[in-house]
Image: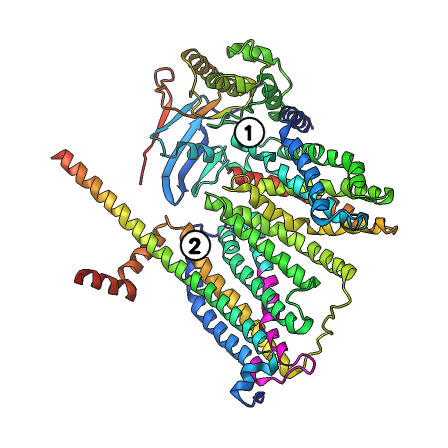
Amino acid sequence: MVMFKAAFVREWRLLARQKADWLNPLMFFLIVLTLFPLGIGAKPNLLAEIAPGIIWIAALLSVLLGAERLFKDDYRQGVLEQLVAAEQPMLAYVLAKIVSSWCSTALPLLLMSPLIALLLGLDSAAWLAVFLTLLLGTPLLNLLASLGAALTLSADKGGILLALLILPLYIPLLIFASAAVDQASLGLDYSAQLAVLGAMLCLSLALVPLAVLKALKLNVG
Amino acid sequence: MFKWLDPYAKPETLYRICGLWFPWLMTAAVATLLLGNLWGLAFTPPDYQQGDSYRIIHIHVPSAIWSMGAYSSMAIAAFIALVWQVKAAQWAVGAIAPIGAVFTVIALFTGAAWGKPMWGTWWVWDARLTSQLILLFLYLGVIALAGAFADRQTGAKASALLAVVGVVNLPIIHFSVEWWNTLHQGATITKFAKPSIDASMLWPLLISILAFGLILAALTCLRLKTAILENEQHRPWVRQLAVSLAATPAKGSIAKSVTKEEV
Amino acid sequence: MRAVFSKSSADPVFTASNLCCVRQDRILFEAVNLHLAAGQLLQIGGKNGAGKSSLLRILAGLAQPDDGIVLWNEQPLADSDFSQHLCFIGHLSGIQPQLTALEHLEFWQASFGLKPADGYEVLAVLGLAGLEDIPCQLLSAGQQRRVSLARLWLTDRSLWILDEPFTALDQSAIVLLQRKFTEHLAQGGGIILTTHQPLTQHFPAAQLLELAYRW
Amino acid sequence: MPELNFSSWSAFFSMGGYGLFVWLSYGVTFTLLGLLWWFSQTGHRQLLKELAAKQARELRVQQQLQKQSAQEQS
């Protein structure tokens, strides 16, 4: 717990001093969202129909964009090897990293979701669905992205490889999240999809941090 | 669990075993493949609905089955490698991955070539084809990760971990794609009826499935041999092996040296 | 306050036998044996590229040897409580340029499981008074090294494994660090380090392990 | 023994009108499998050659070193 707090505070200080790290993915998200209507056409019906897919694809790309830096500095500067060598509570460190990355990349998305709904012509029911799926789904995005970041930590071309490894794993999330928003915009019940998202989140909360830990150790060794 | 095995003797013995099995497995694989495919191509009656196009089944189904089979065996090897730190299992992951990827490509391509006359289009977002495509992405991820590190050991371990993560995800991906497919199923796509296959058609199919399994086993042996040599190249037994094989050069290199002397 | 290093000071508590390391298919070293008892210092020497850092990483349990075994209290590293006695400082400083020296100390104390101590005092001892709360990227290489070495003043761990601790330090800092070493050894701790600096003058009992550069 | 299904070679090759798809599938399958086998096999041989070459290189270095030390002694 002490370690979690220390690592979390440290991470917040770093984020406060390197604003580009979390601001750039956010701007990327907004720009991608604007590109879709420009590319496909801004007919309100069409936009509302493809909005769930657009929002989710933009969200997972922006999370991926910010993921690479997650452990990179700590690896390059030797912080990780010291943590591994001294067998300090690494799991707390990993969790602190994931939580702070969620706070810096996904929380702003949640806060921006009314704006997004406005831009893409979603009604309030669909917006609520976007909000709820983002709430349940983005932690999953961050968990898997941190796994990708840990796996490719010492690889030569980490960035693009990270996307290659993790994007296929996002498919179930994408399917269920956009289906929920779809259902909501038709005025149907989407609690089943939310339940599936919740189940996937629980499963990955239990397993992914352990895999991240293992990946970090083998990249440092 | 395997710690009692002498770390020296093990890769060497494994290398010998693979070398011993490979020719037999490969011969059996080629024989069964020819038997199954020729039988299926020339000696079975055509399907009453699909005509002769169904004969693609003799490569499509075996490659699809073994693309999954290869992934599961890769994941089992990866699990053993991670939990019990068995190096040979770690190398097996890298040896199986390209074979599985090729099987997946074959299954995808033959699926498309079968779909064209049946569905009128090369590609449909059918649940099975889509999961197969995602399986290919997973394979490519494992292969790409294995080759991305300056240190080969790190690459092997990382790709083993990814293979295990992938196998946990595979059922989830499969079911979500299946569910998505029922949701978005277009009216134009007619699925195949449940196969009630005649015995005369079943035998060549079973033989072809066996053949693809044998191909997987044989090529795994061959690639594992290479991986063992690559990772154990500083050991005395590998050095001796390389020297003894270099002392008896292949025909091509003799011809080359002769022409050089003549010039 | 200090963790007990050994039952009787004469027994080696840390031994490595027949270590072999292969990097990029080149044998860096093989058949390396070493042992360390309480109060001893072991210096590992050798040319650049001889494998000093790789050996240290193996000794610290970060990397696995390709052959041989490292024992702590007669137990393999992974099965022992070794990591709770180890303070490892590699050739990477572990300094995050955006954070201040004090913030680094705070994080290290938490990660060593220590109670917060007075960071100002430690930094003053290291000659960093007045530089405690400015980002480390504004410090010189030698000052950053001092911040990084502040861990030795914070930790209560008994075995120190240090990769080139004297790099970038000026004479006064070197003397300071050597005095810290003497103090640590006198308390029954052990030190393994790599350096090109001759140490036998200050530590007559130091063992020297020379790694040969090999093909 | 199952009976031969096709009456002539041309019937066999046309596959009831589906010849393109059937033969394309089989062609691609066998090409890919063949390539995989070939790459695995040559990769193995290549590695053995490289290992032998590496040892020859080491031997030359050692001989050179011995020569040098012999010269220094004399």
Residue C34 sits in which quadrant? top left
Measured as percent of width and height from the top left, residue A172 is found at 71, 52
Q: Nearer the viewer, residue A152 or A46?
A: A46
Measured as percent of width and height from the top left, residue B18 is found at 44, 62
Provide the residue designation for mark 2. Answer: B228
Name the kind of residue labelled 1 in the image: Val
| Residue found 51% across the figure and 56% down from its top | B92
Q: Chain of mark 2?
A: B
Give the answer, above or below, for where C168 lies relative to B192: above
Crowd class of label 1 (few under 14; some 14 to 19; many from 20; radius 10 Å): many
Q: In the figure, is residue B63 to the left or right of C145? A: right
Crowd class of label 2 (few under 14; some 14 to 19; many from 20; radius 10 Å): many
Most common SS among magenta residues: helix
Q: Chain of mark 1?
A: A
Q: Is residue B1 visible?
A: no
Q: Is residue C67 visible?
A: yes
The colour scheme used to paint the residues is: rainbow
Measured as percent of width and height from the top left, residue A80 is found at 56, 32
Measured as percent of width and height from the top left, residue A70 is found at 61, 35
Give the answer, above or below, for where A182 lies relative to A34: below
Q: So how many labels did they put on this image?
A: 2
Instruction: Provide the residue span drawn in magenta.
Output: B41-70
Q: Nearer the viewer, residue B222 or C144?
A: C144
| Residue found 49% across the figure and 53% down from its top | B91
Q: CA distance from mark 1 to mark 2?
A: 34 Å
> Element under label 2?
helix
Q: In the figure, is residue B168 to the left or right of C73? A: right
Look at the image and tell me in which quarter the C terminus of chain B lies: bottom left
Provide the residue designation for mark 1. Answer: A79
Reply yes or no: does residue B61 show up in magenta.
Answer: yes
